[in-house]
Amino acid sequence: MTPARTLATAARVLRQLRHDPRSVALMLLVPCAMLFLLRYVFDGSPGTFDTIGASLLGIFPLITMFLVTSIATLRERTSGTLERLLAMPLGKADLIAGYALAFGLVAVVQSVLATGLAVGLLGLDVTGSPWLLLLVALLDALLGTALGLFVSAFAASEFQAVQFMPAVIFPQLLLCGLFTPRDKMAPALEAISNVLPMSYAVDGMNEVLRHPDMTPAFVRDALVVAGCAVLVLVLGAATLRRRTA
């Protein structure tokens, strides 16, 4: 992997995003809009928003980054852009790292906006530091980016890319502990939830919600999410195809 080629790839992706306002709006504004809506859905019960708002602060960016990244990468392949790029002295690792860097920068902006809105304007009450919330939200967005890059290798069309969401995202959403504590699930479901990265994203947010300081459990959860993102990026580079069959 060559840093110059990775940076050039990231710059190209960012230039493309600049001319795609709908994708930018989806990544930056939709998580904020969903948090805003959630806050006023529970207007009569602000304690409920405090309970689940932190968890969804991490889940919403993950979902939007997954969706946009998977479709954007697939579009590169179906249009022939990916094949032309890989015909140049550009390795798969350079390409994946460039995409991850570009969308990672977008994820930083997205996480700052969503966290600032939730804590500053919507009054999300957390015991811990808002900076820790921001860290987990950013890691979740990066994980969504990595998952999107990975699954795009297995889709033949944008419609198929969207179809991966029920298979990849929804099971994690149901088993992450958002709806019921994971230790109260059936043993088989708890075992599955223990290997899903979104479970640790939710656990990390809950640690910030409940504890004033950074706890060992928070560090573990953050490292698991970050490690999963790196692992999925490596798998994405290994499975990347030049074109859609």
Image (tube, rainbow, N blue to C red):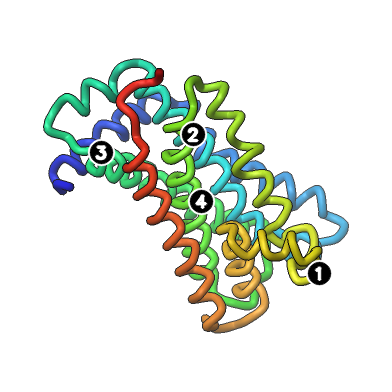
Of helix, strand and loop, which one carries label 4?
helix
Of helix, strand and loop, which one carries label 1?
helix
Identify the amino acid type marked 2.
Val
- On the image, numbered disc 1 is attached to which residue? 184
Are the two marked residues, 3 and 4, in contact with CB atoms closer than 8 angstroms? no
Identify the amino acid type marked 1.
Lys
Q: Which residue corresponds to the image point at 42% horizontal and 39% vertical from the top-left?
A: 149
Q: Which residue corresponds to the image point at 41% horizontal and 22% vertical from the top-left?
A: 75
Of helix, strand and loop, which one carries label 3?
helix
Q: Nearer the viewer, residue 237 or 22?
A: 237
Picture quarter containing residue 182? bottom right
- On the image, numbered disc 3 is attached to which residue? 92
Are the two marked residues, 4 and 2, in contact with CB atoms closer than 8 angstroms? no
Picture quarter containing residue 92? top left
Label located before the other in sequence (2 or 3): 2
Label located before the other in sequence (1 or 3): 3
Q: Which residue corresponds to the image point at 56% horizontal and 25% vertical from the top-left?
A: 160
Determine the residue located farthest toward the front in the rendered image.
188
- Sort mark 4 into few (<14), some (14-19) or many (20+) by Cα contacts within 10 Å: some
Q: Nearer the viewer, residue 104 or 50?
A: 104
